[in-house]
Image: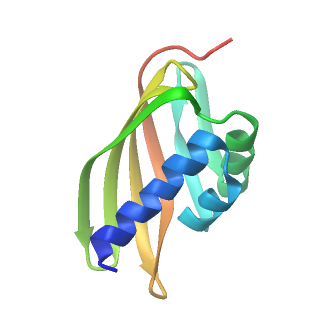
Amino acid sequence: MSADAEIARIIGLYTKGAGTGDGPSLDEAFHDNAYWFGAVGETNYALSKAEFMALAAAQPGDTGNLVSRTISTHTVGDSATVVVEEDNYWGALSFTNTFLLNRIAGVWKIVSKSFVHTGGTLPG
């Protein structure tokens, strides 16, 4: 499989896992030492892989109308940056996510995710 196709597949695993709470998809997509960073309003997030997987399992992002689209992919050798926009996460939130990926021992993994909240308010 080409690097671009494998990177797209890994981002698809993130989208599925975050949207449905599917742990195996997130586990395959993310490196064991991956971290997530960002904020929604006054709430700052700095989550390990395990913490993000627990959050996704407890509160899946797709409440029925999640839209996710890849805006750009830039690959240099064994490193890639992918920008993904999401709308209707948890039913109301919009984000722009920047993923950093590395090919380690021939396997692409997301090593970090940084996000910016671009619209909507937290439910509840």
Residue at the image point whose x is 69% and y is 11% from the top = 124
Residue 122 position in % (x across, y down): 59, 17
Name the image colouring: rainbow
Residue at the image point whose x is 60% and y is 37% from the top = 45
Q: Which of 121 and 60 is in front in this view?
A: 60
Residue 108 position in % (x across, y down): 45, 74
Q: Can residue 30 be seen in this snapshot? A: no
Quarter of the image containing the N terminus? bottom left
Q: Is residue 81 above or below residue 64?
A: below
Residue at the image point whose x is 26% and y is 57% from the top = 73
Residue at the image point whose x is 49% and y is 47% from the top = 15
Name of the residue lying farthest toward the bottom: 105
Q: Can residue 101 be seen in this snapshot? A: yes
Q: In which quarter of the image is residue 117?
A: top left
Residue 79 position in % (x across, y down): 34, 72
Q: Quadrant of residue 21?
A: top right
Q: Nearer the viewer, residue 19 or 105?
A: 19
Q: In this view, does 112 lie above or below 123?
A: below
Residue 48 position in % (x across, y down): 66, 53
Q: Nearer the viewer, residue 61 or 112?
A: 61
Image-based side of 97 in relation to 40, left or right: left
Image-based side of 15 in relation to 100, left or right: right
How many marks on residues?
0
Q: In this view, does 17 lie above or below 64?
A: below
Q: Nearer the viewer, residue 69 or 121?
A: 69
Name of the residue lying farthest toward the front: 64
